[in-house]
Amino acid sequence: MRAAVLRETGQEKLEVLDGVETRTLGPGQVRIRMRAAGVCHSDLSAMSGVLPQPAPFVPGHEGAGEITEVGDGVTGLAPGDRVLVCWLPPCGTCPACRRGQGRLCLAGFMSSGAPVFRHVPSAADLFGFAGTGTFAEEAVTAAGCAVPIPDDLPYDIAALIGCGVTTGLGAALNTAAVTAGSSVVVIGCGGVGVCAVQGARLSGAAAIVAVDPVASRREAALRFGATEAVHPDALGDAVARVTGGEGFDYAFEVVGKSATARAAYGATRRGGTLCVVGAGAMDDLFQLNMFELFFDEKRILPSLYGGGDVLRSYERVIALWRAGRIDLAGAHHPPGPARRDQRRPRRDALRRGAAYLRRDIGDTGEEYPWPYPWRAGPPSSPVPDVAWAAPRPWNWPRSARTSSSTTTGSRAATAPARRPAHPRRRWWPRSGRRAGRPRPIRGTWPTSRRPGT
């Protein structure tokens, strides 16, 4: 088979090698034929040496595919099952798992220090990043790393759920527990960052400011739910404009550098929460003085793998994706001909054995419609305004039913000045023999309750 290999730490390019073999299938293990793999920034950090990883190795820890073979003692899995790769599976028996902190289980790292591939022509052993190595056509992993997925979940979406999506959403929903009506700033709008933006939106945050130096990522953050996106140089202005200089209730650092973590800490209000999501280097020190640590009373919460139960997080993400509550690269929208044509080269490359590499979720230049096509997009959204396409309910006043207003960027501009609380509600007089009981409408509105009077 073929695999993408990094021979030495610090190299900028991967080599696609033929003649690569997986390790021998042992008890409690499964063989997975990869159908999709995603690129997480952790892969790039391992390639550059920021994260410790022995070389040569096969990068990739986000992947999905189908099981082709199972080892002795494996239950619940069979050849042909569709699975995603969990790079940090909980063992269920260690103290961390018994406390309900399966994300802190170290059993999954036991295999990361042993070679999992072999290049036959050169007789060289190859490691797999995080013990997996999804940038290969096949991989042999522990049975706990193979998590079954439903048939309606595409492989490319499942691969992203394996790490980036779960990490970003979980940081907002589990670790920070963003509250409704709060203010949020997300520094770093790559794949994990835009998922943190979506998590804050799901939690009901009133203001979500995305910070990134790349313009395309800022545009993507707006599509995924940010209320505004700014360059890092404009972060101070955003703090003053959005929070009145007090600071944000929640700040997410999704870069993995001490400089951005310090900037996020400074943008957090006193008593607020700083959630550190990015994976950084061991020699990059984050410094605070003891007075500000005590006096400002800011909470600093690291978030590893979403900060919750991994398997339950997978189920929640899939449920939200099915309901259309989150956008995973626009895949939950029915694919049109143009989008299908744009994805075909990626699938063709995948069939040829090349790794499906995507660095940023949603950074494709496509404009995805707002979930409510008859309304305008959110403020600062690149989605163009569209005309109100939904018919007015029959029991609205005639002036509202016959108007043909067009949205101008505000959702409230499309509604009449006053309308019934529910489109099918029956009205009754303020007093009289039938007070408090529904009164049918016979072609006219009661004069005392006509909207707008």
Image (cartoon, rainbow, N blue to C red):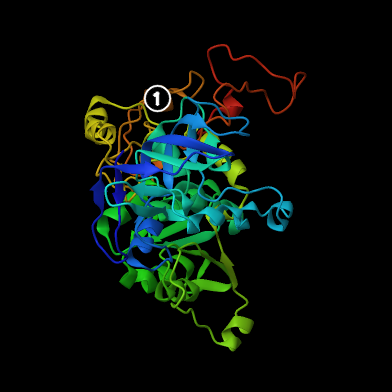
Q: Position of residue 435 (x, y in %)?
A: 75, 23
441 is higher (above) or lower (below) than 247: above
Mark 1, residue position: 390
- Of helix, strand and loop, which one carries label 1? loop
Q: Residue furthest top?
A: 442
Left or right: 20, with 308 as reference point:
left
Which one is in front, 23 or 273?
23
Which residue is outermost to the right?
A: 433
Whether residue 181 is visible: no
Q: Position of residue 162 (x, y in %)?
A: 48, 44
Q: How many marks?
A: 1
Task: Tell me where residue 364 appears, x and y as whole percent.
Answer: 26, 44
Mark 1 residue type: Ala
Q: Is residue 125 left or right of residue 310?
A: left
Q: Nearer the viewer, residue 400 or 16?
A: 16
| Residue 29 higher or lower than 261, as above or below | above
Q: Is residue 360 left or right of residue 430?
A: left
What residue appears at the point 62 percent right and 83 percent down from the top-left corner?
A: 295
- Name the residue at 49% across, 30% down: 69
Residue 21 image point, x, y percent? 36, 42
- The quarter of the displayed image where residue 237 is located: bottom left
Which residue is more in the foreground, 104 or 320? 104
Q: Label 1: few (<14), some or many (≥20) within 10 Å? A: few
Please state which of residues 55 and 244 is positioned toward the viewer in this rendering. Answer: 55
